[in-house]
Image: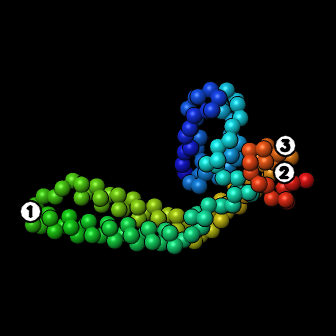
Amino acid sequence: MGYVEGNCPKCGKKIRESCNAWVYGSPIRICPDCKSEFLDKRWREVAIDGFDPRANNPRFYIFGFFGFLAFTIVCVVWLMAMINAQRSYPIKLLGCIVLGIIGTIGCAVVLLRQITGYEDKQNARFMEESQRRMQDKDYVEKLEAYGYSVPDVYRR
Ligand SMILES: [Zn+2]
């Protein structure tokens, strides 16, 4: 889960929208305040842009998982050594351990989602939504006007 934040180019109001981790959705946004339409290229229209290449690359997370795990272990060993030697430890070291654990769990969760097919299911849903938008001729024309090169399948 994540958020996309920005200001409406028309009225300047701050807009905060929730999105998935890879910001899949229509790049044509509507300001909830003044209802004006604008382009936000941070959103990926997956029927055109495809999925984020990082999203389905397990190597990235396997690397991250072992990296964070090793970091956590090193910090824990260090912490124990310091407690043994001087009965005190810097609080920063504890912070590093917490960070390491969060990183390790975060990578493990993404890996699990990929292994169990959850990620694929989510992707299929986002692709379906994207393709549904692309069935709308006006919508496709709007994207082209914004400079998107729309694949021929969606141009009729
Ligand atoms: Zn606005």
- Seen in the picture, residue 65 relative to 152 is either above or below; the reply is below
Pick the residue in front: 48 or 3: 48
Check disc 2 and report the residue beneath it: 135
Q: Residue at x 24, y 54 (%)?
A: 92
Disc 3 + disc 2, Cβ < 8 Å:
no
Which residue lies under the disc numbered 1? 86
Residue pointed to by mark 3: 138
What is the secondary structure assignment of the residue under circle 2?
A: loop
Residue at position x 40%, y 72% in the image: 66
Task: Kindly report the distance in space between the C-alpha atoms of the residues bearing marks 2 and 1.
Answer: 68 Å
Most distant residue in the left direction: 86
Q: Identify the residue at image location x=74%, y=51%.
A: 148
Q: Front-most of 82 and 145?
A: 145
Residue 8 is at least partly visible in this image: yes
CA–CA distance between discs 3 and 2? 9 Å
Front disc: 2 or 1: 2
Query: Mark 1 and mark 3: span between their CA atoms?
Result: 71 Å
Image depth: mark 3 or mark 2 in front = 3
* Amino acid of disc 1: Gln
SS of the residue at dot 3? helix
Left or right of 155 on screen, residue 13: left
